[in-house]
Amino acid sequence: MPYKTSFVTVALALVSATSSAQADIGTAIPLRKRNSLTGPDGTFNYVATIEHGVKIANKHRNNLLNFRRNTGRLPEGVSAIPPPAVLDHIKGHSHKRQKVPLTDLNDDEEWAGNISIGTPPVTFFVDFDTGSSDLWVPASSCTGCRGARGKYNIAKSSTGAKMSGNFTITYADGSGASGPVFTDNVVVGGVKAATQYFSAVTDESSELAEDGTDGILGLAYPQISNLGQNPFFTTAIAQGTTKQDVFAFKLARNGSELYVGGTNAAHYSGAIEYHNLSSHIGYWQIGGASAHVNGKTVGGIATFQTIIDSGTTIMYGPPADVKKVYAAVPGSKVYDEDQGLYSYPCNSPPAIAFSWGGKWWDITSDNLNLGTTGSNTEECVGSLAGLDLGLGSGIWLLGDSFMKNVYTAFSVSQNAVGFAKLK
């Protein structure tokens, strides 16, 4: 997604757009949610949460590696690429990973929908991730791609082409995928990107193969692309196939969707409060944020940067700052100091909110609660954790636990992220 010359590097700007200005001109893609961090009995799934944290830390480590390879430098504020995160500290832990059926309405880890690739088109069920920039799906020759709904076979697509290079994504927990690079027609919600770069992976670890989707479609910027190419939405904009240079998410228990080419006024009320991007790194990153608890701004935390990431389940902030947030929560306790997890009394959840100089956007008690600390306790684990992801000083990562509270729009024409009240 090319940056405009009018891009504001540091200063935060608020831009309002009326709900009618961008309403009902794009295409909606229904989304399903999967893989809960809360067990069926309402208890907190410790192992799944730690595994998710390792995955997210390594995803963004890969993004830093991609940025350095694509630009020849590290982002401002990042002095070194952190080592891979590992899972050694939970080996032998008594908790067992709990799997939840794909259709369970309590799932909330990843948001997925259908796209098509090739001519004739083949349907793939992929995660839509605003925290990465590449598209990958299984190849027809993939080993270990059990349960894939679709597999790509270039011999059966009249518009496909084999390109040079190879795609690889790996994580320290042993999961990963790799394969050759192709171009072909990709259609998302009726929006077509011709000759779109992607990988059809021929090798996929069991950890990824069993997560319920065929692959990932990244919606961030080209700077963090492993393929070194424009992501899908950038290509669609360049080819003029999207009605507006905007896509938007509604993430909720019912009726979740990705809206491509505008915003869907049926899902929000009032104006969208836009905030200009504050970084050229390649993320959907906005600055000037503040945190609030029970109607008061948390003291001792300078205004901070936030990355809005639909591929992350919970919210992460620098450990020292998150500690200050929970210090303002009556009855809060440290649940796991190493992982920056805290608990609070279930019967009196705090009202936590974030602001970027405009409205305060509240986290509902349901979205803050990851589950109880045990089957007979009244302590709940919070979905805000203190963890250093190596993204630089003062950068927070706000995932679905935040996005489920607001309608979120991502505007390429404005280089901005916007929030509106859900209906």
Image: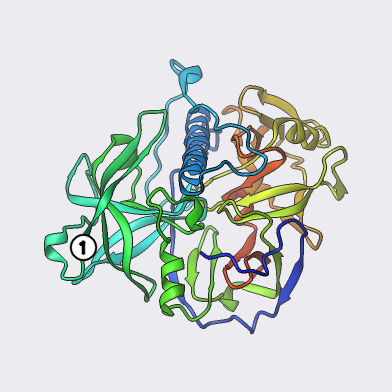
Instruction: Say which residue appears at 29% left-offset and 66% top-offset.
Output: 116
Instruction: Say which residue appears at 74% left-offset and 42% top-offset.
Output: 349
Q: Nearer the viewer, residue 149 or 281?
A: 281
Q: Which x, y percent locates residue 279?
A: 65, 54
Instruction: Say which residue appears at 67% left-offset and 43% top-offset.
Output: 396
Q: Nearer the viewer, residue 137 or 277?
A: 277
Q: Nearer the viewer, residue 68 or 319?
A: 68
Residue 399 appears left or right of 97: right
Q: How many marks?
A: 1
> Quick one: which residue is furthest to the top in this view?
92
Instruction: Say which residue appears at 66% left-offset and 22% top-offset.
Output: 337
Residue 413 appears left or right of 62: right
- Identify the element where label 1 is drawn: strand
Q: Which x, y percent locates residue 139?
A: 21, 51
User: Residue 293's image quarter?
Assistant: top right
User: Residue 332's image quarter?
Assistant: top right
Amino acid carrying mark 1 in the image? Ala
User: Residue 417's image quarter?
Assistant: bottom right
> Quick one: which residue is furthest to the front in this view?
72
Image quadrant occupied by the C terminus: bottom right
Describe the colour scheme in one phrase: rainbow
Q: Which x, y percent locates residue 173?
A: 40, 28
Residue 270 drawn above or below residue 409 = below
Q: Is residue 378 visible?
A: no
Q: Residues within 10 Å of mark 1 (few under 14, many from 20)?
A: some
Q: Which residue is mark 1?
A: 161
Residue 300 appears left or right of 64: right
Q: Which x, y percent locates residue 402?
A: 64, 52
Residue 155 drawn above or below residue 334 = below
Q: Is residue 413 visible?
A: yes
